[in-house]
Image (cartoon, rainbow, N blue to C red):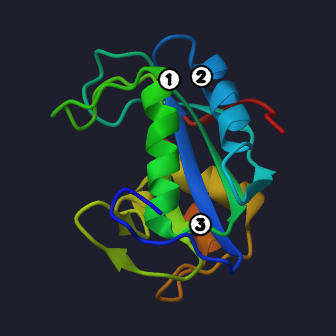
């Protein structure tokens, strides 16, 4: 059971997770998050993008980010997966503030969960800003170029039409 008493389900689902960090050795934060995510119950990592450098979205008086995207096969519900990801963030030292685009030790976002559209108080899927974020679309297209978003948009086409905004590949993760 999750915090809101929704049960863990038995079907296999594919979730795409965005990873980001710009504090406390970001490359290590993302590598440690991968280790922790590989231990999520009833889940396994199936694909991982390269690690990318990106400019911060909000205030520019913070370090650049390191970002990646991974595909996770899971039997968890979306909210149970969210609980697991937030637990990983908390253990990494994530502090939740009102500063929406501030610096972060670790940020794990559910970008997609199968073809589901979720709009709840705790979770919005597809992730509300993913189509405007090069640090999400380009790594996502790297690992799932044929993916079609709920609503019919192609990840590959979206990635071809987005401004890369200085996004650079740093290294392979997987």
Which residue is tagged 3? 76
Q: Mark 2 points at which residue?
A: 29
Question: Mark 3 packing: few (<14 Cα in 10 Å), some, or many (20+)?
Answer: many
| Spatial CA span between label 2 and label 3 | 24 Å
| Callouts 1 and 3 close, C-beta under 8 Å | no
Q: Which residue is drawn at 57% across and 53% down?
A: 17
Q: How many labels does the image show?
A: 3
Residue 32 in which image quadrant: top right
The first of marks 1 and 2 along the sequence is: 2
Where residue 158 sits: x, y (%)? 55, 69
Discs 2/3, front: 3
Q: Which residue shows up at 59% across the image and 76% down it? A: 9
Question: Eyeballing the image, is 30 above or below 155?
Answer: above
Q: Residues within 10 Å of mark 2 (few under 14, many from 20)?
A: many
Residue depicted at 22% across the width and 65% down the height: 121
Based on the displayed image, in which of its 4 quarters is residue 137 positioned? bottom right
In the image as oriented, which residue stretches furthest toward the left? 98
- Most extreme residue toward the top is 24
122 relative position to 157: left or right: left
């Amino acid at each position: 059971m999750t915090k809101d008493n929704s049960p863990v389900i038995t079907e296999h689902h594919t979730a795409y997770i965005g990873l980001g960090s710009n504090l406390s050795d970001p490359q290590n934060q993302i590598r440690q998050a991968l280790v922790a995510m590989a231990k999520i119950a009833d889940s396994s990592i199936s694909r991982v993008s390269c690690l990318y450098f990106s400019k911060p979205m909000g205030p520019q008086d913070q370090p650049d980010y390191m970002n990646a995207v991974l595909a996770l096969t899971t039997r968890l519900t979306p909210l149970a997966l969210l609980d697991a990801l937030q637990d990983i963030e908390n253990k990494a030292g994530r502090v939740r503030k009102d500063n929406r685009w501030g610096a972060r030790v670790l940020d794990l976002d559910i970008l997609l969960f199968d073809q589901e559209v979720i709009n709840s108080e705790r979770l919005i899927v597809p992730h509300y800003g993913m189509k405007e974020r090069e640090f999400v679309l380009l790594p996502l297209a790297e690992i799932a170029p044929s993916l079609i978003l709920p609503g019919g948009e192609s990840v590959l086409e979206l990635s071809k039409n987005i401004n890369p905004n200085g996004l650079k590949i740093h290294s392979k993760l997987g």
